[in-house]
Amino acid sequence: MKKFLIAAALLTLGSASAQKTQLEFWTIALAPLFNEEMNRLVAQFEKENPNVDLKWVDVPASAIEQKLLAAIASGRPPAAVNLASDMVVKMVDQGALEPLTLTDTQKKVYFASPLNTFTFDGKVMGLPWYWAPKVVAYNTEIFRKAGLDPNNPPRTLQTMIAAARQIKDKTGLYGFMPNINNLNMLVLFQEAGLPIFDKKGGKAVFNSPEHVKLLQGYVDLYKKGYIPEDTMRRGFTAATELYSAGKLGMLITGPQFILRVANDNKAIYDVTKVAPYPINLAGNVIHTPLMGFTVPKGVKDKALAQKLALFLTNDVNQLQFSRVTKTTFPSTVKASTDKFFKQGGQNAIDQGKLVSSTELKKARDLTLVYPDASKLNKVFKDNIESAMAGQKSAKQALDDIVKAWNASL
């Protein structure tokens, strides 16, 4: 009889754990730095939802889109996926995401601008998570060697370019690695106050003399050897590596990546100071890409998936994430008012946080939404690369892009 009771009890335990819902959420490049915080979120959600087994999976930025589309195609998508705003545009374009059904109260948790970034044709396709206005980390030793004042870093894009030239001329090291690969030139146009579309929004107009002049400036820097050769291929990844190796004067970065420098090379981190991202004299906005959580197409329990996305991006958890990263900012109204964001400090991470917090008022996610995005983006990227390589003039490249875009739009 006793054996029978033990067996029955074990069966009951087995069926109870078997009945638990298996849930998974994916993030981008947070391991191993933020394992502890992610595991805390898992434990907390499981505590609030005892019938759920939650698993966290971290994916490299370069692989997340492909991996997500494959998971959707196989009928086994995760419940929630962390995507950057430009990735969300592509996924919406491919019909890979589920729209969310939010109450007005739930919407009011977030700032209107970030929530709007994830709203397409009136449908909310993602919940805003963290963002961080770009800053400039700069190597004070390289500044001194180049005859620049480490206490007076460039405040405008124009003076930053002049400083970059001076660093290369005086030290042989690169001054900076501008974000001009992929679609970043579209961002630089907007940061300079230049339009991408006409007033009605149906026609591309970024081949004006002002647009051509801005692109030509970077072509000249590239041609004359003031920009590293692999700028167009490897962009930000290469910039972070070069800076950490002490071979780059200034790093345009989200403040969270200063942590990478601290981990990669303490000696370089110790001579690093942080300045605000230099504004273009003609503009006054800073492109600040948003991270968000989305619910993929074909999730088994959409309500539970949305509950998880809301949990991951709520006030309490966004503030806690910022406290752990020390460098990112919440997209929720209440968390953003916390005094934590006003505390300065001597080290580069604390400086980065304080500098970024003062720039939030200029922060805008300038990611654009337009039909046939994948096709048009390729046309843009290929032509900008042709201009940088000297295969086309800056004017010809922009004319060709605008012509192709308008034929499609």
Image: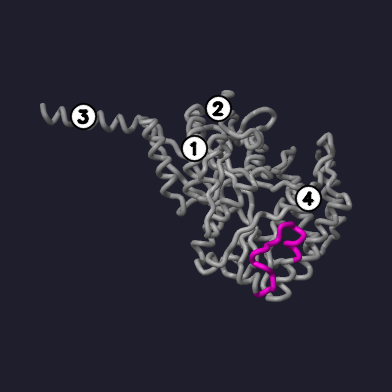
Would you say 137 lies left or right of 335 here?
A: right
- Disc ID at residue 241: none
For image coordinates 36% across by 34% down, the residue present is 47
Q: Amino acid at mark 1?
A: Leu
Residue 203 visible, this angle:
yes
Characterize the magenta stretch by its predominant secondary structure.
loop
Give the class, few, some or many, for how many residues have Cα within 10 Å of label 2's Cα (few <14, many ≥20).
few
Eyeballing the image, is 234 above or below 99? below
Find the distance from the CA under tag 2 to the CA under tag 1.
13 Å
Does label 3 or label 1 sit earlier along the sequence?
A: 3
- Residues shaded magenta: 145-162
Q: Secondary structure at mark 2?
A: helix
- Disc ID at residue 9: 3
Q: Which residue is mark 4?
A: 192
Eyeballing the image, is 276 above or below 107? below
- Disc ID at residue 106: 2
- Which callout, 3 or 1, points to the residue nearer the camera? 1
Find the distance from the CA under tag 3 to the CA under tag 4.
69 Å
Q: Based on the picture, tell me whether residue 85 belongs to the magenta stretch.
A: no
Front position in the image: 86 or 153: 153
Front position in the image: 11 or 154: 154
Check whether the beta carbons of the residues at disc 3 and disc 4 lie within 8 A of each other.
no
Does label 2 or label 3 sit earlier along the sequence?
A: 3
Q: Position of residue 319 (x, y in %)?
A: 50, 41
Does label 1 or label 4 sit earlier along the sequence?
A: 4
Q: Which residue is mark 1?
A: 312
Q: Quadrant of the C terminus?
A: top right
Q: Amino acid at mark 2?
A: Gln
Q: Amino acid at mark 3?
A: Ala
